[in-house]
Image (cartoon, rainbow, N blue to C red):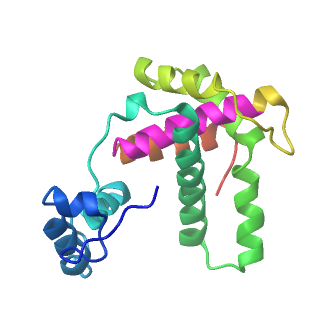
Amino acid sequence: MEEKLTGAAEGLPAAAAETGLAAAGRSAAAGDLSAEGSEAGANLAAAVDAAFALREKDWDQYAPLTLAWIGDTVFDLVVRTVLVKHSDRQAQKLHRAATEAVNARMQARMAAALQEQALLTEEEQAIYRRGRNASPAHNAKNAERREYLDATGLEALIGWLYLKKRTARLTGLIRAGLEACGVAL
């Protein structure tokens, strides 16, 4: 359902205007554009919250496939960021390097490695299991069903950590998983 915009808070959802978040949203959107190194800029999720006047939610209650949906993108963004910052290569070469890490088989191997090394907390294991046990309507093109489910579990964990703004933990686990699988970005 599309939210209507109010004249007083043009460009912001009506819910933000009604709750008094419109001014904060305008301030974040207009005033923080040059705030390099600001606290919000250090964490993408926090910056998005500030720019769009979003409220915190109970991410533990979100559907695991929703967490996996955002986690897939976050994982891809982390891998692409590392690749771009390591070397200014042609886009085609960057894409090939990214697809070596961003695929269900590799993510399933990473999930297994993180568990074998006992790197996940009990809370993280519970989120991973919820994602792994979800029932996606489709399968990966180049992976077995079990690998796809394991990858979905990892993506759900990454999405959950991102939304909880646990960026250092998220990037640390991704790095540990890639290193355990012998992937050098």
Q: Which residues are magenta?
A: 148-165
Measuring from the top left, give residue 183's x and y in whole percent.
69, 48
Residue 99 is left or right of residue 8, and the answer is right
| Residue found 64% across the figure and 58% down from its top | 185
Dominant SS type (magenta): helix
| Residue found 41% across the figure and 28% down from its top | 61
From this view, report whether residue 167 is shown above or below residue 79. above
Residue in front for this viewpoint, 7 or 31: 7
The reply to whether residue 109 is in sight is no
Measuring from the top left, give residue 122's x and y in whole percent.
43, 17
| Residue found 66% across the figure and 53% down from its top | 184
Residue 155 colored in magenta in the image: yes
Measuring from the top left, give residue 142's x and y in whole percent.
87, 44
The reply to whether residue 130 is in sight is yes
From this view, report whether residue 78 is shown above or below residue 87. above
| Residue found 44% across the figure and 38% down from its top | 160
Q: Determine the image quadrant of residue 53.
A: bottom left
Residue 145 colored in magenta in the image: no
Residue 50 is left or right of residue 108, and the answer is left
Q: Determine the image quadrant of residue 111.
A: top right
Residue in front for this viewpoint, 3 or 128: 3
Q: How many marks?
A: 0
Residue in front for this viewpoint, 41 or 109: 41
Measuring from the top left, give residue 38's x and y in whole percent.
21, 67
Residue 165 is left or right of residue 53, and the answer is right
Residue 44 is left or right of residue 172, and the answer is left
